[in-house]
Amino acid sequence: MTKNIFDRSEGAAINNMKLIFLACSVFSAVDALWRSISFITFFDSDVGYFDGSIMPTLSNCLLVISCAFALLGFIFINKNATLPKTLDSSPNSVFFASIFAGFVMAVDFLYKIYVMIGEERFEYYAFIFKKGFRGENSYLLRATAVIEIFGALSAILTAVWFFLRASKNVKPVIVAILGFFPVLRALSGIATVYFDMDVQMNHPSKLLLQFALISIMVYFLCEMRFFVSDKHPRPRRFFVSGCVAILLGIAGGASEMVGFFAGSTSKGTFCIEAFFCLTVGIYALARTSAFVKDAESLTVVEAEDEAEPPEIS
C-alpha cells in the first residue's frame, strides 16, 4: 500500500484512499486524547486559555497537519479512478451510527426546549419581539433569540433526517431535500458559538468548534450530491470532506466535552455543540469507511471483468 502513496495513477487511487482514511482515523483518536490531556493539565480556567505549554501547541499542530494530509486526497486520488456513484446504507456500522446520531439530535432538541421553558423564554421572546421594544443591544438580543429557536427546530429536523438515513427504503429525492437539515443544525451551532459574547473571539474552544461545524456543513453538502442525480456525485470531494469532518469532529468534539466535564471549561452550550460534532464525526467515520470498502470492491469487480476472456461463439 505504502509504495504507491506518491503514485497518482488510477490504479493507485484506492490504495492511497485507504492509507489516507486509516491515517486520518488514527490521527483523530490521537489528537482527541492529546487535546483532552491538554485541557485537563494545561488549561487555565480562570484566564480561559492554555497556559502556554508546548503540549497544547503540538496538539493544534498535529490537527492542522492531519487536515492537510486529508486534503492530499485531491492530489493522490486520481479523478478518473473508478469510485462509487452511490452510498451504501447496508453496513451495520452506518445503521447504528445513523440511529445514534438521531437519538442525540432528539435529546438535543429536548434539552433546548427544557432550557427555554426553565428560563421562561417564551415570555422573554414575546417581549423582545414587540414592535416597540428598544433597549441596549436590542438587535443582539433578538438575534440570539432567533438563533435559539432556529437551533431547536433544526435539531429535531436533523433527528428525523438521521432516522430516515438509517432506513434503506427512503427515496433519494427525499434524502436530498431533507439533507439540508443537518447543514442548518451546523449553521445554528456556528451562530451560537460565534455570538456568545461571554467568550473571547480567539478562545481556543470557540475557534475549533467553528472550524469543526464548518467542516460538518461541507461534508453534508457533499453527501447530498449523491442523492440529487447520477451526474452530481463528487466522490473525491465526499471522501476528503469526510476525512476532515472525522478529524475535527472527533478530536474537537471529544476534547471539548472532556474539558467541560473535567471543569476546565464551563460553557454548557459549547459542550452541546461539541457533542454534536463528535456525533457527526462518528457518523462520518462509519459512512466514509463504507465508501472506501465499496470503492475497493468496485475496483476488484472491474478488474475481474477485464480479465474474463471473451466468449467464443
Image (tube, grey):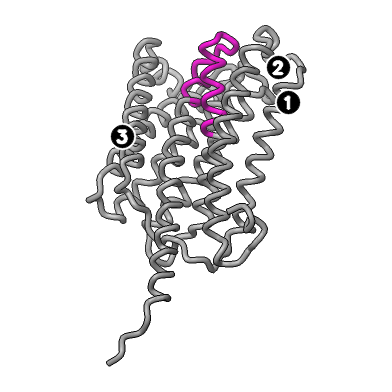
Can you tell which of label 1 and label 2 is closer to the viewer? 1
Q: Quadrant of residue 146?
A: top left
In the image, taking residue 232 as reference, residue 114 lies left or right, namely left
**Label of residue 99 in the image:** 3
Question: Which amino acid lies under the numbered mark 3 shown in the image of this protein?
Answer: Ile
Count residues near mark 3 (Cα–Cα under 10 Å), then give few for <14, some for 14-19, many for 20+: many
Q: Which residue is mark 1?
A: 57
Of labels 3 and 1, earlier in sequence is 1
Q: Is residue 256 magenta?
A: yes
Question: Which amino acid lies under the numbered mark 2 shown in the image of this protein?
Answer: Phe
Q: Of residues 113 and 297, which is closer to you in this image?
A: 297
Q: Position of residue 17 (x, y in %)?
A: 54, 53
In the image, taking residue 114 as reference, residue 208 lies left or right, namely right
Q: Of residues 88 and 143, which is closer to you in this image?
A: 88
Q: Position of residue 289 (x, y in %)?
A: 44, 46
In the image, taking residue 56 as reference, residue 300 lies left or right, namely left
Compared with 189, 137 (above or below) is: above
| Quarter of the N terminus within the rendering | bottom right
